[in-house]
Image: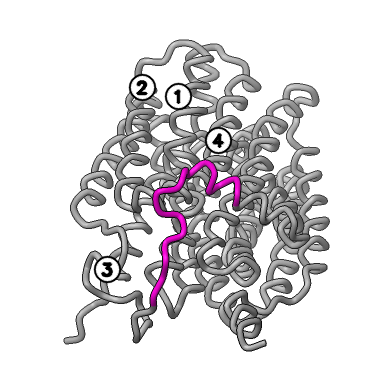
Amino acid sequence: MKRIHYSWIILIISFFSIIVAGIVRSSSGVFIDPFEKEFGWDRSAISLAFAVGLFLYGISGPFVAALIEVLGLKKMMVTSMAILLTGILLTFVMQQPWQLIMIWGVIIGLGSGLFLTVLSPYIANHWFEKKRGLAVGILTASTATGQLILLPVLAMLIDHYSWRWAVGLIMILSFIMLVIILLFMKNTPKDMGILPYGLEKERQESNEFEKKNPIMIAFNGLFEAVKVKEFWLLAGSFFVCGLSTSGLIGTHFVSYCMSFGVPLVTSALLLSFMGIFDLVGTTVSGWLSDRFDNRWLLFWYYSLRGASLLLLPYALFEGSFTLLIIFSVFYGLDWIATVPPTIGISRQIFGVKKSGIVYGWIFASHQAGAAVAAFGGGIIYEILNSYKWAFLLAGIFCLLASLFVIVIKKQTPASIRTEESLKA
């Protein structure tokens, strides 16, 4: 029997690490109402804490990418999961809104940064020579799947017992994942005496980041990226991506459904339903990104997502559960299908080595959009007593993002450009 290449073991460990981090990060959606009722905090204050977390885990991306190059992948994964576990434990003793901001905004935000930003492209770039798009698709799918798949379970625990039971389940999963990372994770294929999957001959690679300041590495990557027009177009479209997914749907969808009389568990079940279809949609998107023009993939993803968000307020107003199911399936397939082609374009423009840090900055823009939607959705609800305009505006912005990506010029991969310049 042919032995499984260890790159696939690394992918599996990373897959479940991302799922656990995603569960922690996205559970905010089911905690808004319980925190509001138990502590008497305003919804805008609770939304602010979750918005800070969304922004911090995004902005930490490029610095985490640089730290991986300096400290190693395993050490960073262990540290990040330990930080997440610390934040979860502190949740049991919080009493004030500022403590919620520190725990769910700062600690959990920074702890989830590695898993939900640059881990996917790093694993694909360093452990895979072939099937990189598929690897990115699988790992990216786990990001949203983890964020959504266990929400009904958490909602049932909250409904029947208390939010503390839900936090306890998250704590157990995080501890199990920390142990698995400690036992089985490796930094590079060289640690196992193997080559990346699909690479037949070892190539010389100099680590230009070795012993350098990770902060300077991250900012140097940004200074180089901002000179390229395509960086701004990708960052702008990804801002809208974050705004329309984890920021709005991830944070406010459950509360939006509940405002129309949909029960908590049913609302969470619809969100989980999206996660199941996201696993399919994003994995297929990774496969497609290896074969088709990534710009056109992004164009259709943003256009169709915008159309679905414009449908949602109508579905809730009409009280049509059928339309809600259709929305959940349709939106789920497109939840973060944008990630593999965005990473693909970034890798084509900036090359394998630098694309991790550059993508970290692009993802920071994604999370800035998520933070705007998480906080802005709470503000819109406080002012209008409805989420309708938050979702309509998100749909319009998605249609705008489809125009951003289609004007990106078709790229020649950076490696090919380098070879051509050397021949010249």
Inspect the image, locate mark 1, and give the three-letter code of the amino acid beneath it: Ile
Secondary structure found at label 2: helix
Q: Earlier in the sequence, mark 1 or mark 3?
A: 1
**Dot 2 and dot 1 residues touching (CB under 8 Å):** yes
Question: According to the image, label 2 marks what residue?
Answer: 90
- Whether 35 is drawn above or below 22: the answer is above
- Residues packed near mark 1 inside 10 Å, few (<14), some (14 to 19) or many (20 plus): many
Asked if the stretch drawn in magenta spans residue 166, the answer is no
- How far apart marks 4 and 1 lie (CA) works out to 12 Å
Report the mark closest to the observer, 4 or 3.
3
- Whether 44 is drawn above or below 148: the answer is above
**Dot 4 and dot 2 residues touching (CB under 8 Å):** no
**Dot 1 and dot 3 residues touching (CB under 8 Å):** no
- Residues packed near mark 3 inside 10 Å, few (<14), some (14 to 19) or many (20 plus): few
Q: Does any portion of residue 308 appear in the rendered image?
A: no
Residue situated in front as seen by the camera: 379 or 364: 364
Give the percent coordinates (x, y) of residue 337: 59, 63
Disc number for residue 103: 1
Secondary structure found at label 3: helix
Residue situated in front as seen by the camera: 283 or 213: 213
- Is the N terminus in the top left, top right, bottom left or bottom right quadrant? bottom left
Inspect the image, locate mark 2, and give the three-letter code of the amino acid beneath it: Leu
- Residues packed near mark 2 inside 10 Å, few (<14), some (14 to 19) or many (20 plus): some
Q: Residue at x 18, y 52 (%)?
A: 183
Q: Residue at x 68, y 56 (%)?
A: 225
Disc number for residue 64: none
Left or right of 14, for residue 417 = right
- How far apart marks 4 and 3 lie (CA) works out to 32 Å
Question: According to the image, label 3 marks what residue?
Answer: 190
Question: According to the image, label 4 marks what residue?
Answer: 56
Please give the range of residues in magenta. Answer: 204-220
